[in-house]
Amino acid sequence: MTPTPPTRNPAAYVVGVDFGTLSGRAVVVRVDDGAELGSAVHAYRHGVIDRELPTTGAALPPDWALQHPDDWREVLRTAVPEAVRAAGVDPARVIGIATDFTACTVLPVRRDGTPLSETGLGHRPHAWPKLWKHHAAQGQADRINRLAHLRAEKWITRYGGKISAEWQFAKALQVLEEDPETYAATERWIEAADWIVWQLTGAESRNTCTAGYKGIHQDGRYPSEDYLAALHPDFADFARTRLEHPLVPLGSRAGSLTAEAAGWTGLPEGIAVAAGNVDAHVAAAAAKAVENGRLLAVMGTSTCHVVNGAVLADVPGICGVVDGGIVEGAYGYEAGQSAVGDIFAWWLAQGVPAGYQAEAEAAGEDLHQLLTRKAAGQPVGGHGLVALDWMNGNRSTLVDHHLSGVIVGLTLATRPEEIYRALLEATAFGTRTIVDALEQGGVPVHEFIVTGGLKKNALLMQIYADVLRRPVSLATSAQGPALGSAIHAAVAAGAHPDVRSASAAMGSLQRAAYLPDPGRADAYDALYAEYRALHEHFGTGADKQLHRLRALRNAALRSAAPHDTDAHDTGPHDPDAHDTGATTPTERP
């Protein structure tokens, strides 16, 4: 008699959901090997709200960027069930769900989690979620930094010496100073990464990643009430009343899927919901970049760089270092560039003549492909150009969102593809500045790994390899953050013991996909020296010309704008540059 083969347990699955700048995407993943079986994308109906408020049509001031919370809920209602259908799996076999978000995207809510934009305050801009690229709180960030250094606050060195205008405290202080009524109605101030978990579980939770990198939570505490009161008397209790909450470690179970959320998603009620996370940090698990020294660059509309290190070091100009900020047992370092793909999209929208569009259509290409092909054959330095990648300010290492872009070397013979290549190179130079700062600060970088939508541009990846003088590895998944979230869901559901082991089993990586060419690398060293000269002159020198130009622009725009004191009078501004609203070709996955 032939023995009966042992019964194999049916496969288990998890869902990862990545909330990006312009859309949200869901992926269904098998827990034992990380196979991605189905995915779906939902574009936000309201996109980036940077011109007028949806409720009133009132014009927004310069450098504002808001979002609509129901766009995020709609991702749960549409993309998740669509992904499950595309995967062809039984929803009953899904054991967990996890999410990640752009950060710092933050919103004021009632104590029950209701966004203030969905209350009677919806006509006020400060009641709406502030997207990561909302840079109108630069003045508040400057004051936060000056006071921290004046008082020798210990935590300021953990952020490279500067808190960003993009983060929680600067944005909250802006609300208090420009719209006290909305601030008074804010019972909880919460990252979208934690708010979406609240929607799934029915209970508030806070994750260690966003608290550490975006919320100045270091050594078990937020900045003191004495320090906050020195910024503004009414800001003294901000952390205690609006932020304070037990923190949930990454990969932990934050709660269980409620009946309502099960109805939205089509997933079983009661399955594990993992702690919230940030898109770049969660993607490290998908790219097998959780070991020390493996720097992951999540490249899309902007770029975020994350790397683990064995020791705590103070690195000037980084976004932050957090114990366990990426995985338990390591110090997670973060840096970034405020615009990358958005810069390329800006040039396609503004600087390419109609004849190029016709040529691209005739060749069956899009404009990115056409300009890449035209630029690829040019020798390094053949365009005679160098650019600063600051069209949306500088996140690292200057942490100054008053800065703006610069292109030097233009002549009447300069072609659109030459400017395009100079912009590609500028973002690589910005990344080299960050890598140099990390290594000079005592954080070794052994491997450079890329994930995100821009990894498909072969010219861009080769430029990075040549500029950095090191191989560029590529994360295999086209949905890096969503896969990373799914890996964390598997840990939260108990399918793997920790994020490291789950990453080894479910992540994937193509090592050394692009190798540096010594001759081109030598030529790029010369161009990089010119980039650094511009970087020092406009970024750290005494000449604040870019700041003066920004101030002139904002003054002119404010004087020309209609004045509506009830709907959108937000008081004084000290803002910075804003996003171009780039669409699908440059959105990070």
Image: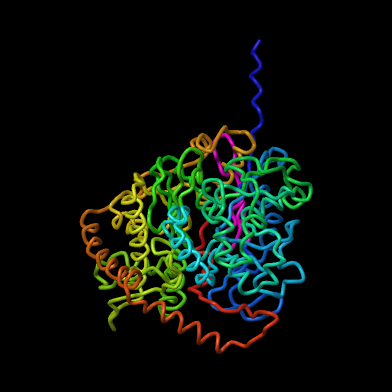
Is 308 situated above or below 230?
Answer: above
- What residue is rendered at 58% in x and 52% in y? 100
Say whether residue 480 is left or right of residue 40.
Answer: left
Looking at the image, which is closer to me, 119 or 147? Answer: 147
Q: Can the viewer see residue 9 in this picture?
A: yes
- What residue is rendered at 50% in x and 45% in y? 326
Looking at the image, which is closer to me, 129 or 235? Answer: 235
Give the quarter of the image for residue 124. bottom right
Say whether residue 215 is left or right of residue 355.
Answer: right
Residue 25 covered by magenta stretch = yes
Looking at the image, which is closer to me, 537 or 349? Answer: 537
Looking at the image, which is closer to me, 189 or 453? Answer: 189
Label tally: 0
Find residue 58 and report its horizontal and vertical position in percent.
66, 81
Is 35 situated above or below 574?
Answer: above
Find residue 17 and report its horizontal and vertical position in percent.
61, 51
* Magenta extent: 17-42
